[in-house]
Every structure is written in C-alpha cells, then in structure tokens.
Amino acid sequence: MHQEEKQNSEQTEEGLLYTYNRELFYHFDKEKGFSREIDYQVPANQTIIRQSWDAAEQRLDEVRSLIRAGKRSPIAYYMEKTLMEIPILADYMEMGKWRIRRHMKPKGFKKLKPEILEKYASIFGISVDALKNPEL
Amino acid sequence: MVKLEFEHRQAGHCENGVTSNLLNYHKFKISEPMVFGIGAGLFFSYLPFLKMQHAPTTSFRVWPGMVFDRTTKMLGIKTRVHRFREPRESMTKLNEVLEQGYPVGLQVGTYHLPFFPPEYRMHYNMHNLVIYGHDNGTYFVSDTLMERLVEISYDDLMRVRYAKGVFAPQGRMYYPIHVPDNIDIKPAIIKGIRKTAYNMVGIPFPLIGAKGIRYLAGRMRVWEKNLGPDRAAYYLGQVLRMEEEVGTAGAGFRYIYGAFLEEASRVLQQDWLREMSVEMGENANQWRAFSYYGSRNCKKRGKPEQSYDFLADMLLDCADREEKIFKKLAKIK
C-alpha cells in the first residue's frame, strides 16, 4: 500500500538526489515471497540521508559564527568540516580529549607547537597556512 | 601482480556478502541469507548513552566481525584473522596472502574510501570489502555495496584500514583457508536460529532485543517534548539511518532473515519455518512502513507530519511480532 503512495507523493516533490550507485534490496510480498532487486535508494531513504548532511552543514554554520565571535579556534571548524567529533579527532591525534578541547579555543590554539599544528593539518588534509587562516 | 578469479555479487549487507562471496570462491555455495542466519546476525539494541553522530546509537545487527566468525566456526571452516599495530606490516601481509591465492576480507572505515558513494562518506568503521588482487600499488576491490568492481591505491587502502574512532578496524583482515568436504549445514542452521532467538527474547536486559524495541518506542513518545521538534527529528532520523542506510540496513536485515527462514525450511524440511518466514516478511514490511512514515518528519523545514505516538505504536507492533516469532523459533529441534 505505501509502495505506490511513495511513488506518487515523493518522487515528484523532491526527485532522486543520490544516483551514484545502485544497491541490492530485499522485498517481501505475501503472494510472491522474497525477492531481490538492484535499484537506487528510494526517496524516503534519501530524505533521511540528506537530513544528516543538512545537520552537519548547520553545525558548521554554528562553528563559523563562534569563530567570528572569537570563541573557537580553526581546529573546531575543520573538525566539523571533516565530519569528526572530539573522540574521533582525539583518536587520530593520539591525545586526550581534554587537550583537543583546549586546542579548540583560541587561547589554546595560539600556544600550539609547530609539530602539533602539522599533525592537525595532515589529518584534515590541508596546509598549516590554511589551518591558521581558514576560509570560513 | 596477482588477480584472482573472484566473482563479484552485490549483497544487502557488506559482511554477509563478503562472507558468502569468500566461501563461494572456495567452491562452497552459500547464499547471503544463509550466512546471515547461521552467523546469527539479527539483533536489536538501543544505546542512548553511546552517541554516534550526535545522537543515540541504535543497532539492528550484531557487532562487526561476528557474522564471519560464527558462520565459519559453526560450519567447521578453517580461517585466519589478523590485526596489526603497524600499518605497513598489515599491507605486506595482505600482499603475501594474495600471492598465496586467497582473496581477503577487510574491515575498513568509509570516510576516505574514494570509490564510495559520496553521500555515505561519514566516519563509519564497520564496512567490509574483499581485496582479490593487486598490481603495482593498485588493489582490486570487490565491495558488495557497489554495482561494479573497483580499485584503490596503496595509500588510500592503508588509510581506510587504519581509520580511527568507534570500532576502529586496526587493519583487521580475515579469510578462509580450508573448506572441508561434505559440510552438513543442518546443525549449524539450528544453532544459528537458537542463538538469534536467545539474543532477541532471552537476554534479561531492557535495551536489547524485543524489549529494546519497546524501550525505544517509549523514549520516542517524549522526544518532542524533551528535545524540541528539531532534535526529535534528528534522533528519529538517526534511528532510520541505522535501519535503512549502508552497513546496518535494519529493515533489510528483517527481510534477509525471512529469506533465510524460507531457505532453512527447505533444507531442514520443516514446514512450520516457512510460516515463520512469511511472518518475518510481514514484520519487515512493517519496519519499512515505519521508516517511510518516519522519514516525513525528517524533511528540511516543515513541521512533523506524523505524530511520534503513531510511530511508537508502529514500533510496539514490530516488537510484538518479533517476540512472537522468536519465542516460537527458540523451540526449534
């Protein structure tokens, strides 16, 4: 029942966003039993995938305004930009989470040694220059 | 240069697919649902204290690696599993094993995976793929999510094998080395079903199995009041992403399990399992309907279109169905 509804309401409204690759999906029908089909993600699923990208974009906007207000360092910006969270970044940096938190503030960022700046830059995939002067 | 004759078959989920394809290479024909059933991959847990991407973790399957380990163990297949502290060492070992003529399963992180669909490139460490050859620093990849065979460079591969975060792969590689003749899969099927039934209805802990689904339903009713409409929609979206998206296609898992029960009824010649597979299929359709209605609340802008009480009721229905199915399945002989 909801199968047809999906076709009519969603497809015309938003269309398919992601058509990079077709995946295998299982289906069940009382008469026909189980079946497999290769197709793009249905619009309903694409909506929920996009929601997480929208949320990431929104978090990035919040960090941008915090940096402009002088409350966060570029580390916080690039962390959001590469979709990381403090525990993941701490893991990559091989440091305690509390140190990462300190580096995310302008005061802590200013005191960073060149080696540590370089390590951050290589994890974010950018140059040290870009790390110091982010294009917000 | 090594390039093994590896048959690429897409699958509903990466680890089942990798296991099934690897065994297929060793001339042991086994379908994806069969692997999933014997490996007791179906699960449910809701862990509000473990946050992933800023929302509580919901899992519709067992921990990564378990399906491969359990399936091969129950079937008496000899395997090797390695982890390495030193990234370069892990790559040398990979080359060595390929040269011996074994395709290798790898656990990887998805953020830096260059051929991956861009919309899935998040920090997610539970993806699995097969390497079936290499040539001059380029590795040949069979990824069950992808339509076609793909390639990856030495550096990129090393990077994704050493992704960090929750469930970091630490270079984990695994491969079967010997499949004995005349494997009897019947006892393995029965054991697999018992294990899944225990996981879903037997564990006395409120966040796991059918009880976990009910607990999540209860929390869902108060999300909007406690978190506000935006956070509530994001939390709901997180549950749905875990349910439908890459890696943990949750409703997908219910379908795969249903297909497994159908196959099991044929192999074991027990007709009642066929009825159970139909019930599981209907349960899966209910989960899919839940994610369809739920996704309406996750659109950009716009008010929630479905009340959270309505969605929670759907979940309770799923929990009842699963409890009923697995209480019956627990009695399998």
Image (cartoon, grey):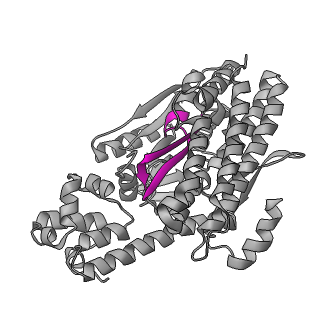
The residue shown at (20%, 55%) is: A98
Q: Nearer the viewer, residue B130 or B196?
A: B196
Q: Nearer the viewer, residue B114 or A107?
A: A107
Residue A38 is left or right of residue B245, and the answer is right
Q: Is residue B290 magenta?
A: no
Q: Start and end of the magenta stretch?
A: B41-67
Residue B5 drawn above or below residue B152? above
**Residue most extreme to the top:** B333
- Residue B277 at x, y percent in the picture: 78, 36
Q: Is residue B15 something that shows in the picture?
A: no
Quadrant where the image shows the C terminus of chain B: top right
Residue B94 is left or right of residue B239, and the answer is left
Corner quadrant of residue B309? bottom right
- Residue B279 at x, y percent in the picture: 79, 38
Q: Nearer the viewer, residue B211 or B257?
A: B211
Residue B103 is left or right of residue A20, and the answer is left
Q: Nearer the viewer, residue B165 or B98?
A: B165
**Residue most extreme to the front:** B225
Q: Is residue B47 magenta?
A: yes
Corner quadrant of residue B36? top right
